Image: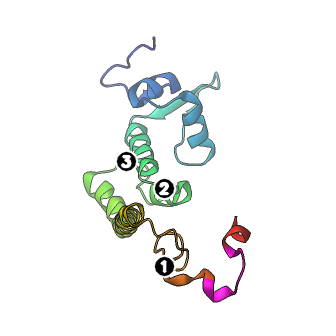
């Protein structure tokens, strides 16, 4: 079991960061390779992370959970201030940047859910009328034949 860092410790080892964040060491190494977090190296070549890396890791995990691509997370984290712990205002600015995208995603999922409910109940099995498999008869515009199979 990893020893807990002192409450006033300025830096965390990779094991401490893993234990505190609940993220595997391998994932932390991946985040570092991708430029999402950074560490300094000791004279013994061991990683040391600033305490605010815990907040960055939490943001990464939450953003991933809602489907934000890593490239977008990277860009957002790059806008955080260097040399100081980000404030609540900094985090709010980041999350507001994703609000529209998340609202659009929620709207699309609600539409899909509603169409799916209707599809299960109707039993039409018609590619011509099915709003879920063939909205607005898109396949019909491309001519006869198995168009849907060609897309796979």
Residue drawn where x is 41% and y is 56% of the image = 80
Quickly name the residue at label 1. Answer: 129
Residue drawn where x is 55% and y is 28% of the image = 25
Furthest residue toward left? 88
Residue drawn where x is 63% and y is 24% of the image = 43
Q: Where 47 sits versus 69, above or below?
A: above
Disc 1 element: loop
- N-terminal of the pair, mark 3 or mark 1, is 3
Quickly name the residue at label 3. Answer: 84
Q: Residues within 10 Å of mark 2 (few under 14, many from 20)?
A: some
Task: Write the start and end of the magenta stretch as one range.
Answer: 140-147
146 relative to 43 in the view: left or right: right
Residue 56 found in image quarter: top left
- 4 inside magenta stretch: no
Disc 3 element: loop
Quickly name the residue at label 2. Answer: 73
């Amino acid at each position: 079991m990893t020893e807990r860092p002192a409450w006033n410790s300025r830096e965390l080892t990779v094991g401490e960061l893993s234990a505190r964040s609940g993220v595997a060491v391998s994932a932390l190494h991946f985040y570092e390779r991708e430029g999402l977090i950074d560490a300094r190296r000791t004279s013994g070549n061991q990683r040391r992370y600033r305490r605010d890396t815990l907040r960055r890791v939490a943001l990464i995990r939450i953003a991933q959970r809602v489907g934000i691509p890593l490239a977008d997370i990277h860009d957002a984290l790059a806008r955080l201030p260097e040399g100081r712990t980000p404030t609540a205002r900094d985090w709010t600015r980041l999350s507001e940047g994703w609000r529209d995208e998340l609202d659009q995603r929620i709207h699309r999922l609600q539409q899909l859910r509603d169409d799916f409910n209707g599809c299960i109940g109707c039993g039409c099995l018609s590619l011509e009328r099915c709003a879920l498999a063939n909205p607005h008869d898109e396949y019909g515009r491309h001519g006869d034949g198995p168009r849907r199979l060609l897309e796979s």
